[in-house]
Image: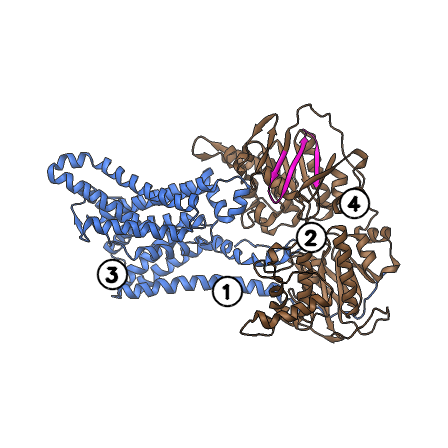
């Protein structure tokens, strides 16, 4: 960890120091980011070792490992979408709803076409997928419009979008599970390259693309700056409308891609698929070192956090623990990591504050 | 506390005394071996330049910061661990520059609320507490409308409200942080009248100021700090303006003008005509030429900052025209201003100017991201790092490397980062609001040198400031703003400290 010197400005009247101290809280975010990747790597290895030791035969079974690799992508992609929104200091509660909405749209269109003419449906598949993604982008744009242009708080704007999309999905499907998702997708999902499932490679590809977006594009830089300090961003001429709209369109698109992964992995679609994902995805994003206040996040951290939770989930399966116990574990891991951050932060602070008073020399009035 | 204790000049046990206080932040020493004794009924002036440690000392006295070393005595009794609530209980009250009032509450409520809270009352009754407010206002002979919302008061009345509040809380020590910065001459005179009444009540006052005449006029005792070191203490009568300046700056004051007289082009780079923003300023008109440094000054609240914010699109003008290089530009947003070639180094560096948690590199590039593209999507990382490197070196930012977070920098270096951000954008007109506020003396001169250099390279520079020596040393011309109107323009030899101060506060 880089040593962060806390050296406030000593040269201003009017509460400079006080403000620096108030801002110390924000430093938590920095420390989190610096360590997040290493920390997640350690946690991942530890979790893996732990379950390997407890249940080597089940846990190290290639099928189990493949299972982790196949179930991680959808959650991971959603977590990356969440990370992007959080990077701007916002949140996107609607990503899972967007994913489901995309999945349902694609399934409905495909099944409708395939009922008449399977060959045509297959040849139109790319178009159908694009249409699904376009809808996802529109939903994301709508979020961006509400947040960046209208000025609604992200959590409320995306909550509304989530409710609308979930509602539409239920009305549309009548609450039924839809069958008949494109088989071609399932075939691709089952393919492996050198033993690695294609879905997992797809996930890594998306991670790399988003990492490039965040780190070496003008948009990515603006997005980080917007999240780090929206006021200074405004005074630096960074157009928040454009940045926020682009961000939520991107997170919507990622939601759409996750929706495609949904139906590739499991050729059905329903309005309530992945209903527990929203909070899980927030947990993963934060575990991965995303500062919920904005400005800092690493894609690598989020990828590792995704894998860690998948390992824990699969380990719990191996131990025959239930999804509820897994949910307890998620909460505990999140709190533990946050406490670890806090403790390190507080001890640093205490050291700074409680330097023992130097014994005072007597009477030094009026040195003139 | 009401026992009258007129200033006698015969110090008894000090109400409050600090001895040999030291405090450092990180590696930087803010205070070292500072001592101060406050007598009841005396005004003690704490003087020094920006950054000399005045604020830190106040924070230590009020319990907001804990000293690394030294002792605090109240009525001769040691208080090794002072906390803010303890300080208030002992009757130590600080009136900060922003007064810390609740703008949406009335004067009466503001006056009594803190003392009610301090008494841990569970219920607040406006009726029951109002007499206390009335009493104090009458006692000081003020004409304050108790039922007016504080947000609708003038700066001076807000200050009086804060003083009343301190007295209701049984203050024995009142520390006023730069109380006259936003006041006109007559308001300052009224404040000094109140100060004398407070003295008669036996209150010990600390008057923090860097305005020398005031310091000499109002105080009985005087302490001067410089760079966190206790330079001198003694009765005010032992000092004059010249010796004060010498103690404060450590050298004879340098108010020499260091300006060039550029060959002005016929066409101004920025031309403003009858610019108005209702409630802030009206009919502002001026020209700024390439190579020129133009000062805009006035008291706090005179409209000086609003003029700059309007030109930067933060506060779009209601009427008037702005021309940049002869072309009329409509400035409705910051984007418009930047596109027109106007840059702005804002007053509030911490929130408006900097991304504190981000690296120096990110901060420098923040304003010119789109000028560093390669192709439609990617950043040109080579160009980015060379720009950053160039500005980092050019402005001599003192940091281990460009990846250090801006939070770790001193005020002077942080301001250079903001400056670098704008230079990266190569604006035609650069406006700076309080360019050297919170900046140490050495950095200050370097920053001003950068402004001269940029002007020399053909930029039009607008300096909004109330730092008179700064205006004198760097500006070709100075506009004086009073109550939202440009009342005077000083030029050439007319640009001098006394003239500016007179016109500002008239």
Q: Quadrant of the N terminus of chain B?
A: bottom right
Judging from the image, mark 4 belongs to the subunit labelled B
Camera-side mark, 1 or 4: 4
> Magenta span has B284?
yes
| A309 with respect to A368 (left or right) | left
Give the total of numbered labels. 4
The mark lying in front, picked from 2 and 4, is: 4
Q: Which residue is mark 4?
A: B502
The kind of secondary structure the magenta stretch mainly shows is strand
Residue B50 location (% of width, % of height): 72, 52
Boundaries of the magenta span = B274-296
Q: For the residues tagged 1 and 3, is the chain the same? A: yes
Q: Which residue is mark 1?
A: A343
Q: Residue at x 77, y 51 (%)?
A: B185
Kindly indicate whether the residues beneath marks 4 and 3 are on one polypeptide chain: no
Give SS at disc 4: helix
Question: Which residue does the numbered mark 3 point to in the structure image?
Answer: A58
Are the residues flagged by discs 1 and 4 from a single subunit?
A: no
Question: SS at mark 1?
Answer: helix
Gap in angstroms between the C-alphas marked 2 and 1: 31 Å
Numbered disc in front, either 3 or 2: 2
Q: Are marks 2 and 4 in contact (CB under 8 Å)?
A: no
Q: Earlier in the sequence, mark 1 or mark 3?
A: 3
Q: Is residue B153 visible?
A: yes
Distance between mark 1 and mark 4 Cα atoms: 55 Å
Q: Which residue is mark 2?
A: A11
Q: Residues within 10 Å of mark 1 (few under 14, many from 20)?
A: few
């Amino acid at each position: 960890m880089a040593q962060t010197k806390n050296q406030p400005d000593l040269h201003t009247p009017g509460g400079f120091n006080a403000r620096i101290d108030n801002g110390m809280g924000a430093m938590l975010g920095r420390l989190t980011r610096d360590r997040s990747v290493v920390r997640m790597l350690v946690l991942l290895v530890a979790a893996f070792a732990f379950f390997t030791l407890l249940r080597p035969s089940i846990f190290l079974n290639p099928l189990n490992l493949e299972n982790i690799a196949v179930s991680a992508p959808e959650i991971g992609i959603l977590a990356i979408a969440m990370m992007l929104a959080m990077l701007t200091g916002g949140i996107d509660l609607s990503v899972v709803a967007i994913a489901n909405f995309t999945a349902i749209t694609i399934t409905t269109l495909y099944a409708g076409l395939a009922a008449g003419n399977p060959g045509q449906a297959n040849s139109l598949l790319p178009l159908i997928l694009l249409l699904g993604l376009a809808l996802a982008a529109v939903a994301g744009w709508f979020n961006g419009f509400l947040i960046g242009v209208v000025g609604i708080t992200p959590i409320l704007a995306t909550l509304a979008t989530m409710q609308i999309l979930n509602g539409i999905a239920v009305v549309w499907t009548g609450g039924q599970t839809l069958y008949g998702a494109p088989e071609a997708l399932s075939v691709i999902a089952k393919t492996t390259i050198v033993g690695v499932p294609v879905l997992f490679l797809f996930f890594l590809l998306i991670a790399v693309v988003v990492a490039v977006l965040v780190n070496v594009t003008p948009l990515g830089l603006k997005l980080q700056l917007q999240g780090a300090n929206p006021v200074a961003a405004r005074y630096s001429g960074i157009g928040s409308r454009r940045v926020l709209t682009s961000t939520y369109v991107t997170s919507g698109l990622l939601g759409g891609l996750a929706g495609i992964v949904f139906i590739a992995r499991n050729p059905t679609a329903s309005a309530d698929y992945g209903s527990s994902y929203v909070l899980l995805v927030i947990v993963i994003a934060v575990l991965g070192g995303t500062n919920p206040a904005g400005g800092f996040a690493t894609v690598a951290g989020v990828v590792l956090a995704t894998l860690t939770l998948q390992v824990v989930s699969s380990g719990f399966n191996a131990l025959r623990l239930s999804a509820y116990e897994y949910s307890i574990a998620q909460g505990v891991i999140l709190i533990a990591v946050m406490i670890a951050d806090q403790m390190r932060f507080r001890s640093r602070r205490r050291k700074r504050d409680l330097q023992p008073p130097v014994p005072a020399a007597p009477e030094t009035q009026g040195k003139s | 506390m009401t026992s009258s204790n007129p200033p006698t000049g015969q110090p008894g046990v000090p109400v409050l005394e600090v001895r040999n206080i030291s405090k450092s932040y990180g590696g930087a020493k803010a205070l070292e071996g500072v001592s101060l004794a406050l007598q009841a009924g005396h005004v003690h002036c704490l003087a020094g330049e920006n950054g000399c440690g005045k604020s830190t000392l106040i924070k230590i006295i009020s319990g907001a910061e804990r000293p690394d070393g030294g002792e605090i005595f109240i009525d001769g009794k040691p208080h090794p661990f002072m906390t803010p609530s303890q300080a208030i209980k002992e009757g130590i009250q600080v009136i900060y520059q922003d007064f810390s009032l609740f703008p949406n509450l009335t004067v009466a409520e503001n006056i009594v609320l803190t003392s009610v809270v301090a008494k841990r009352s569970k219920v607040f009754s406006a009726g029951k507490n109002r007499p206390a407010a009335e009493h104090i206002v009458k006692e000081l002979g003020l004409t304050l409308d108790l039922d007016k919302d504080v947000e609708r008061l003038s700066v001076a009345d807000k200050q009086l409200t804060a003083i009343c509040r301190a007295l209701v809380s049984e203050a024995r020590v009142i520390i006023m942080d730069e109380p006259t910065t936003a006041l006109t001459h007559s308001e300052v005179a009224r404040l000094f009248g109140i100060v004398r009444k407070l003295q008669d009540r036996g209150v010990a006052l600390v008057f923090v100021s860097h305005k020398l005449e005031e310091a000499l006029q109002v105080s009985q005792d005087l302490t001067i700090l410089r760079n966190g070191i206790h330079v001198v203490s003694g009765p005010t009568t032992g000092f004059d303006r010249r010796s004060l300046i010498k103690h404060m700056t450590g050298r004879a004051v340098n108010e020499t003008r260091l300006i060039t007289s550029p060959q002005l082009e016929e066409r101004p780079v920025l031309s403003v005509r009858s610019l108005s923003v209702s409630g802030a300023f009206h009919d502002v008109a001026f020209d700024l030429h390439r190579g020129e440094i133009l000062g805009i000054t006035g008291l706090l609240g005179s409209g000086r900052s609003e003029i700059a914010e309007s030109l930067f699109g933060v506060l779009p003008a209601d009427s008037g025209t702005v021309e940049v290089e002869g072309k009329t530009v409509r400035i409705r947003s910051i984007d418009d201003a930047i596109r027109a070639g106007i840059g702005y180094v804002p007053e509030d560096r911490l929130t408006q100017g900097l991304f504190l948690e981000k690296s120096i590199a990110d901060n420098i590039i923040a304003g010119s991201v789109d000028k560093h593209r390669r192709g439609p999507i990617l950043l040109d990382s080579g160009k980015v790092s060379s720009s950053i490197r160039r500005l980092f070196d050019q402005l001599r930012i003192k940091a281990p490397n460009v990846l250090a977070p801006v939070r770790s920098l001193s005020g002077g270096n942080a301001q250079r980062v903001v400056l670098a951000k704008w230079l990266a954008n190569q604006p035609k007109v650069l406006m700076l609001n309080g360019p050297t506020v919170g900046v140490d003396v050495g950095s200050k001169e370097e920053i001003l040198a950068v402004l001269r250099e940029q002007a020399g390279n053909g930029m039009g520079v607008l300096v909004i400031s109330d730092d008179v020596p700064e205006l004198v040393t760097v500006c070709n011309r100075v506009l004086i703003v009073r109550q939202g109107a440009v009342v005077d323009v000083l030029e050439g030899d007319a640009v001098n400290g006394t003239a500016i101060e007179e016109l500002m506060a008239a």
